[in-house]
Image (spheres, coloured by chain):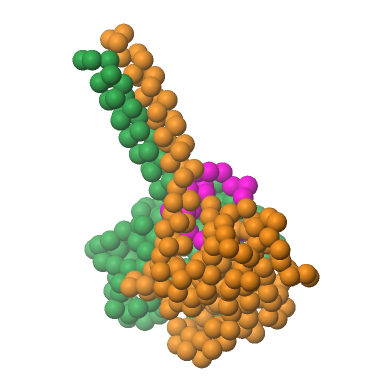
Amino acid sequence: MSGWRGPLLVMLLTAAIGGAGAVIATPRVIMGVAIDRLSSVNGLNRMSHGDLATPENQPVVRPSPDLAYSACSYDLSKGPLRITVMPVPGRYSSLSIFDGRTDVIFVRNDVQARAQPYRVIVALPGQTVPPGSDVVRTEEYKGIALIRLLLTAPSELPKLEAQRKKSTCTMI
Amino acid sequence: MKPWLRYAIAIILGLTLGIGGAWLLTSRGLSGGQIVNVPWQTSLGYGVKATDPLTRAAVARGGLLALPATETVYWQATTDSAGRGLTGKCRYRLTGGAIDARWWSVTVYDTKGFLMPNAARIWSVNGANVPLDANARWAVSLSSQRPEQGGWLPTTAGKPFHLTLRVYNPGKAFMDAPTRAALPRIEREDCA
């Protein structure tokens, strides 16, 4: 039995390290899959205005069927990103920016924006941005910018489509 | 048994235990939060840098791209108000009143957090489309069969489900005491 003492310790150590490693790696792995999946439609650094979530259309887990999502998977390795948001007057919308670890690095809703269009620059430390810009600095190269727009009914989407497509994201 | 074989077995078992344990611990979706308002649970730590690694991993698996609590509070119910697991075998009455927020919704998901097909193509009720009575209260039937009258939130016959309550731009009173906030009740009526 004494011959198992060492292996037993190794097993416990491996379990602890493997468990901690899996917990820490999970957000980054899942975010990587989501970035790839979302960018497969429109490419990186471009805003994709998705259809409403249904059982047949669920790019990510737990989508809200009441929201129209516009998503931009980004990669800052070649330069900063400019996001332009056009709120729809009188209804909830928000821009949220998630880094590669799933943390929110920026969020602004339509009330905070006073229902006015706004621009946000996402940049790595040291990247040059236009003077006077509203800048979000991040050390993560990749992430997802997501615009949520509340609908009172799915039938509203066609008439709001033109307005929501004015929201864009592009490399500077 | 040769020593190297014992160590190889130990490493395989250790990794299996560690990764399996991590998988189980992060399977709670949005229901493992520290804030409980029966039958709803949440955390105010979703999406923020200061959150703990377990919560971050659980949210990545069960609610990727969740907003921080200042913007939206995500409550999850896996049981009715009496603590019994939610199942499409039963019919429930979901009732509530005004919620201290700009907007709210209740959505039905399967246990992995995905919308389930239903012929009516209804997956949620929200503060904008639920009819209020004279006392500003609302009620919908949570069931696989359409009720003869009243609002309806369809479930899938025989399948377990979870509910997610989204509370957008919650008010100060709500954020100060989320455990005492007035949230919808889920009462089981009968089962097949």
Left or right: where B84 falls relative to A25: left
Chain that is orange in the image: A
* Residue A139 percent across, percent down from the top left: 62, 53
Relative depth, front residue between B8 and B172: B8
Q: Residue A162, percent across and down?
A: 54, 89
Residue sitting farthest toward the front:
A78
Q: Is residue A86 magenta?
A: no
The residues colored magenta run B49-70
Per the image, is B58 magenta? yes
Q: Colour of chain B?
A: green
**Extreme right residue here?**
A132
Looking at the picture, how far across and down is residue B170, in whole percent? 64, 65
Foreground pick, A23 / B30: A23
Is B176 drawn above or below residue B55 in the view shown? Answer: below
Residue at figure coordinates x 65%, y 85% from the top left: A89
Q: Is residue A121 visible?
A: yes
